[in-house]
């Protein structure tokens, strides 16, 4: 068997092993002086630090009376609770809004022949001159695809 | 709240000892302990059933200590020195010795990472790896490795105290 890892030695010290592992590791320690030395050192270290910590803290001689917290604390909690009707409204209102938006009838789009006309305006307007001096060319395409040019000054 | 009173009487010293290990000599110990029991009281008052009060108290006390310590991190060392000075000025020899001991321990523990410190303190309470994992949030399979590493880190920092104790 390979030498024990620090983790395995620590588990052995703390008895955090299965019965099989415990037997296997103990057997190894009996035959391996390196692991045996490590085990003794680590065991002393664990116990030493446990004791140092436990000795450093005081243990109170008497238990003080527990000061019961004022009722206001729990009262505040009750007040902070959201009422059921508000919760229901918070869920239902957005749902109703979305449903209304989806169901809203779209207006029928029936354009007249005049509305079908496509307008294309190509103007070369010089911004530095008076508006009246610029020639404005408007190109109109009717429903038959005929292009009509209109020029205005 | 008879049930609460039983838990309070039964676990007060345990919680006090645990919190003291985190705060080591700080005047905040009493406040934190009280805070932990107030939390339990409010839980029970609200009708929450606390199945394992000991584990619950350990967990809440650990988290409260870590939160308080991280909040006071910057001012802590200054407080500590002034606390120690006050203690030294006011105390008899044994108290000075104890305060010094706590100061050395605190400095050593503060050198560890937060989860390593938590594991060492919970370990010193005699908890099993399973309980330590549950309270600290560290994976159960990593407890042994973390613990071994943390104790090795503490060894040179507490060398004098450790040798003194071994020679006793």
Image: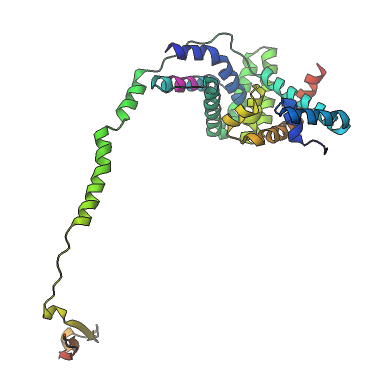
**Residue B54's spot in the image, x, y percent?**
55, 20
Magenta run includes residue B38: yes
Question: So how many labels did they put on this image?
Answer: 0
**Residue A137's spot in the image, x, y percent?**
19, 88
* Residue placed most toward the observer, A24 or A34: A24
Quick check: A3 left or right of A80? right
* Residue placed most toward the observer, B148 or A105: A105
Work out whether B168 lies above or below B146. above
Quick check: A144 left or right of B43? left
Work out whether B12 lies above or below A49. above
Quadrant of the rendered structure where residue A119 is?
bottom left
* Residue placed most toward the observer, B3 or A56: B3
Q: Residue furthest top?
A: A62
Magenta run includes residue A116: no
* Residue placed most toward the observer, A123 or B116: B116
Work out whether A57 lies above or below B110. above
**Residue B143's spot in the image, x, y percent?**
66, 33
**What stretch of residues is rendered in magenta?**
B36-41
Q: Does residue A42 appear in this view?
A: yes
Which residue is painted at 71% across and 20% down in the image?
A: A51
């Amino acid at each position: 068997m390979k030498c024990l890892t620090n983790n395995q030695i620590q588990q052995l010290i703390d008895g955090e092993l299965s019965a099989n592992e415990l037997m296997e590791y103990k057997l190894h320690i009996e035959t391996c002086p390196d692991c045996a030395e490590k085990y003794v050192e680590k065991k002393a270290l664990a116990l030493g630090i446990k004791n140092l910590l436990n000795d450093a803290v005081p243990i109170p001689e008497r238990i003080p009376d527990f000061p019961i917290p004022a009722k206001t604390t729990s009262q505040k909690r009750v007040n902070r609770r959201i009422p059921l009707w508000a919760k229901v409204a918070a869920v239902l209102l957005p749902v109703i809004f979305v449903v209304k938006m989806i169901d809203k009838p779209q207006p029928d789009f029936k354009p007249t022949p005049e509305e079908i006309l496509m307008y294309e305006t190509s103007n070369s307007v010089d911004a530095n001159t008076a508006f009246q001096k610029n020639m404005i060319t408007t190109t109109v395409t009717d429903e038959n695809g005929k292009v009509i040019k209109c020029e205005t000054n | 709240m008879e049930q609460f009173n039983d838990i309070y009487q039964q676990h007060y010293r345990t919680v006090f000892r645990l919190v003291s290990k985190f705060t080591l000599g700080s005047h905040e110990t009493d406040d934190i302990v009280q805070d932990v029991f107030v939390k339990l009281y409010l839980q029970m008052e609200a009708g929450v059933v606390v199945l394992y009060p000991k584990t619950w108290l350990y967990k809440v006390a650990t988290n409260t200590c870590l939160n308080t310590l991280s909040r006071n991190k910057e001012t802590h060392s200054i407080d500590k020195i002034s606390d120690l000075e006050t203690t030294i000025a006011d105390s008899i020899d044994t108290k000075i010795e104890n305060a010094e001991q706590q100061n050395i321990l605190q400095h050593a523990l503060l050198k560890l990472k937060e989860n390593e410190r938590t594991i060492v303190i919970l370990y010193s309470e005699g908890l099993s790896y399973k309980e330590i994992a549950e309270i600290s949030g560290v994976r159960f399979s990593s407890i042994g490795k973390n613990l071994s590493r943390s104790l090795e880190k503490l060894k040179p920092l507490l060398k004098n105290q450790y040798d003194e104790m071994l020679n006793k």
